[in-house]
Image (spheres, rainbow, N blue to C red):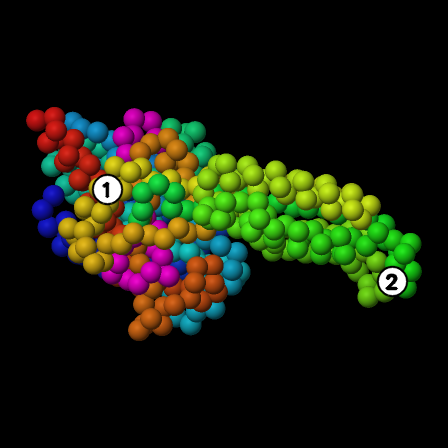
Amino acid sequence: MKDLSAKLGLLFPDMVTWRRHLHRHPELSYEERHTSVFVAERLNEWGATVRTNVGGYGVEGTIQGSLPGPVVALRADMDALPIQDEKNCEYASTVPGVMHACGHDGHTAALLAVAKLLADHRESLAGTVKLLFQPAEELSPGGAAPMIADGVLNGVDAVYGVHLWTPFPSGSVYSAPGPIMAAADEFTIRITGRGGHGGLPHETVDSIVVGAHLVVNMQSIVSRSIDPTQPCVVSVGKFIAGNGFNVIAETCYINGTVRSFDVTVRDRIVERLQQICVQTGEMFGADIQLDYKPGYPPVINDEAETERFFRVAGSLFGADKTRRSPLIMAGEDFAYYLNRVPGCFMFVGAGNKEAGITAPHHHPKFDIDESSMLQAAVLLASMALDYLDGYRKSSS
C-alpha cells in the first residue's frame, strides 16, 4: 500500500480524539463494557465484520481483502488500572480511582486507525487482517486466553502487537528475538506460630521473626541457586502481621512475585521456595504454607518475525531508531498468542523528557507522547502488509 505513513498521518487527529475519550472514561479489567461498545461502533461503521463479547468484553474485527491470501492478527489491549489520575490536563480520567496508566488507550486508538485504513483499501488487500481488541491484560488470568478459546486465532498465520513504552524515547522502536518479557508469577505465604505477650517471647513462636528470616532466606534463591547468567527476580511486596505493640503476632502473611524468562529457572525457583518455607518453619517450630500461582508465561518472539520487524521498522524509521530491546521484567499475556502462532511483540517509545512525559507505567501521573500512536499504527499496519505481500510474491 503506497503512502501508508501519510494515509495514517491523516488519521492522527482521530487517534488523539479517540485516545483522549478513552482516557477520560477508563474501565478496569473485566469491566470494559463501554470501551468495547466504542470500538465495535467504529468497526461496524467502517464495514468490518465484527464479533463482540469475545472472551469477555473483547472485540474481534475482520477486514477481508478482495484478493486471497493469509490471515494476520493485530492486537490491542483496552483495560485500565485502579489508580487515581493525578495529571492536570483536559483529558484526565473522570472516573475516581481508575485511569489508563499503561497506554492501553493509545494501543486501542492506534489499532482503530489501522482498521480504518485497511477498511478503506480492502480492494487492494491480498488476505485478511483480524483486529483483536482485548480486555483484561492487567489482571491475571487475563483476557488473551479466553479470546483464543473463543477462536480469534483460528486460521491465523502470524500475530503482532505493540506496547507504547515511556522508558524508551518517542521516535524509537524496539524488539528482540526469543524471550523479551518475563513470566509473572505470584506467591502467598501464611506463617502460623504461637501468639502471646510481648514481654514473654519465650512462650511464643513469633511469626514476625519467622517471616523476617524467611524473606532474607528467599533472597539467596537468585544469588545462590540460579545460574547468574539467567535473569530472574524474587520480590516480596507485602508483609502483614500483628495488631498491637505488645503482642507477639501468631500469624504473618507474605505476598510477592517471581519473574523469569526460562521454564527451568522458573521451576527451580518454585522448588527452592518450597524447601525454604519447610526448613525455616522447622527451624522455628512454625507452620508455613506456600501458595504459588503461575501467571502469564514469558513473551517469546519468533526469530523470523523479529527479523521482519528489524527490516520493516528499519526501512520506516531508520536503523538508528530501530533497536534491540533489553529484557523487560514486566509480564504480558500477549505471550499466549505467541505460544500458538508465530509473531512479534514490539515496543514503541512514548517518553518525551522535553515535554515532561517521564512518569513510569502504573504511575498516577502517567502519560504518553501522543505522536507515538502514529508510529505504532504505522508499524502494525506495515508488519501486517509486509507479511501479506510476502506471501503473495512467493505464490506468484
Left or right of 194, for residue 390: left
| Amino acid type at image mark 1 | Glu
Figure quadrant of the C terminus: top left
On the question of residue 125 being in view, the answer is yes
99, 352: nearer the viewer: 352
Image height of 164 relative to 32, above or below: below
Looking at the rendering, the stretch of residues picked out in magenta corresponds to 152-174
* Number of the label disc, if any, that sits on residue 198: 2
* Number of the label disc, if any, that sits on residue 373: none
* Tag 2 secondary structure: loop
* Tag 1 secondary structure: helix
Q: Position of residue 185 (x, y in %)?
A: 54, 44
Left or right of 63, for residue 206: right
Left or right of 207, for residue 340: left
74, 168: nearer the viewer: 168
| Amino acid type at image mark 2 | Gly
Q: Position of residue 294 (x, y in %)?
A: 55, 39
Q: Position of residue 264 (x, y in %)?
A: 50, 36
Write down the quadrant of residue 156 in the picture: top left
Residue plotted at (66% across, 55% down): 216
324, 23: nearer the viewer: 324
Left or right of 81, for residue 249: right
Residue plotted at (31% across, 46% down): 176
C-alpha distance separating marks 2 and 1: 63 Å
Image height of 337 relative to 240, above or below: above
Figure quadrant of the N terminus: top left
Write down the quadrant of residue 374 in the picture: bottom left
* Residue where numbered disc 1 is placed: 307
Does the magenta-highlighted stretch encompass residue 169? yes
Residue plotted at (60% across, 55% down): 237
Write down the quadrant of residue 290 in the picture: top right
